[in-house]
């Protein structure tokens, strides 16, 4: 794993944008695996600023997202589909037809997971962007998820519900279940870019980088990826 430590969140976002834009400029038909959460917001702002200033084209870029809350429609303001439109896709002018995310409203879970698995087979990711859960999760693959997993429905860890409650009016509104891309599929990406910011990620960063590769710390699997870059700010890297 290549590790880049930055002085702050702004530098993290700028460095992440450099990695992302290299992929997009190299291959205008690239498939990007994208993530939600607060961490990638700075990167997304840089991508939009670059698109506006330099006209970097997203006309042929296709995207696949990691995860979606179960029970939230794509129009729901807390859904990840809505988050992506608002924070990235609208700003880049990406055709919604070229974007993919699990359908949180799918009545048949197994069928929806199979649909997403098939889609991921057809869309090998040139770059997979990841955030890091404070408990070491990637996407919504919580501790204990087999490394061989494909798309599945998870019951969120209590710590994840608490972490994500800040984005809802009340913790009772946080969905307890979600669809998530599996670890096997995350590892299939040609390149992985994982971002971590803030002191509450320091333990998870340390375990991911220096700890044993174990399903108890899902992000530790990234030690096995041939082209994974971690960009962490000083606070998140404090225990390395
Ligand atoms: C959620 C998402 C993850 C994300 C994590 C960290 O649980 N499913 O994909 O990485 O939150 O979020 P944040 O960047 O807000 O700390």
Image (cartoon, rainbow, N blue to C red):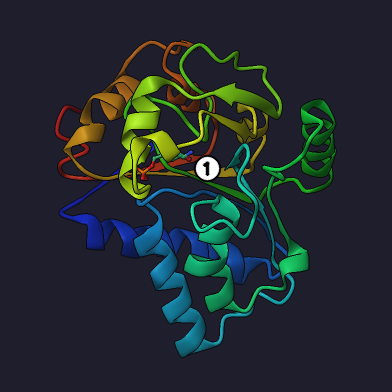
Task: Report how many numbered discs are placed on residues in the image.
Answer: 1
Quadrant in which residue 216 is drawn = top left
Q: In this view, does 231 lie above or below 200?
A: below
What percent of the width, then of the height, locates residue 112? 80, 36
64, 29: nearer the viewer: 64
Residue on which the image places disc 1: 192
Residue 131 located left or right of residue 27: left
Q: Is residue 155 above or below residue 4?
A: above
What percent of the width, then of the height, locates residue 156? 49, 24
Q: Is residue 40 above or below residue 165?
A: below
Q: Can residue 43 be seen by looking at this rendering?
A: yes
80, 92: nearer the viewer: 80
What percent of the width, then of the height, locates residue 95? 72, 73
Q: Residue at x 78, y 48 (%)?
A: 123
Residue 191 located left or right of residue 18: right
Q: Which residue is drawn at 65% across and 51% down?
A: 73
Q: In this view, does 41 lie above or below 138?
A: below
Q: Is mark 1 on a helix, strand or loop?
A: strand
- In the picture, which quadrant includes the N terminus? top left
């Amino acid at each position: 794993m290549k590790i880049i430590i930055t002085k702050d969140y702004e530098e993290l976002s700028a460095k992440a944008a450099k990695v992302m834009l290299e992929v997009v400029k190299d291959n205008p038909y690239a498939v990007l695996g994208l993530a939600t959460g607060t961490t990638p917001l700075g990167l997304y702002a840089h991508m939009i600023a670059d698109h506006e200033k330099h006209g970097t084209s997203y006309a042929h870029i296709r995207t696949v997202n990691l995860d979606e809350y179960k029970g939230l429609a794509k129009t729901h303001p807390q859904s990840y589909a809505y988050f992506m439109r608002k924070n990235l896709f609208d700003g880049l002018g990406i055709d919604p037809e070229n974007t993919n995310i699990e359908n949180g409203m799918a009545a048949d879970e197994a069928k929806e997971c199979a649909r997403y698995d098939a889609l991921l087979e057809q869309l090998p990711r040139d770059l997979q962007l990841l955030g890091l859960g404070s408990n070491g999760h990637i996407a919504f693959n919580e501790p204990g998820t087999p490394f061989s997993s494909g798309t599945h429905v998870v019951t969120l860890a209590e710590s994840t519900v608490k972490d994500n409650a800040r984005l809802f009016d009340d913790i009772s509104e946080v969905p307890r279940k979600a669809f998530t891309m599996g670890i096997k599929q995350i590892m299939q990406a040609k390149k992985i870019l994982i971002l971590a910011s803030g002191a509450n990620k320091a333990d998870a960063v340390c375990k991911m980088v220096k700890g044993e590769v174990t399903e108890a710390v899902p992000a530790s699997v990234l030690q096995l990826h041939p082209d994974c870059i971690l960009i962490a700010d000083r606070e998140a890297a404090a225990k390395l």
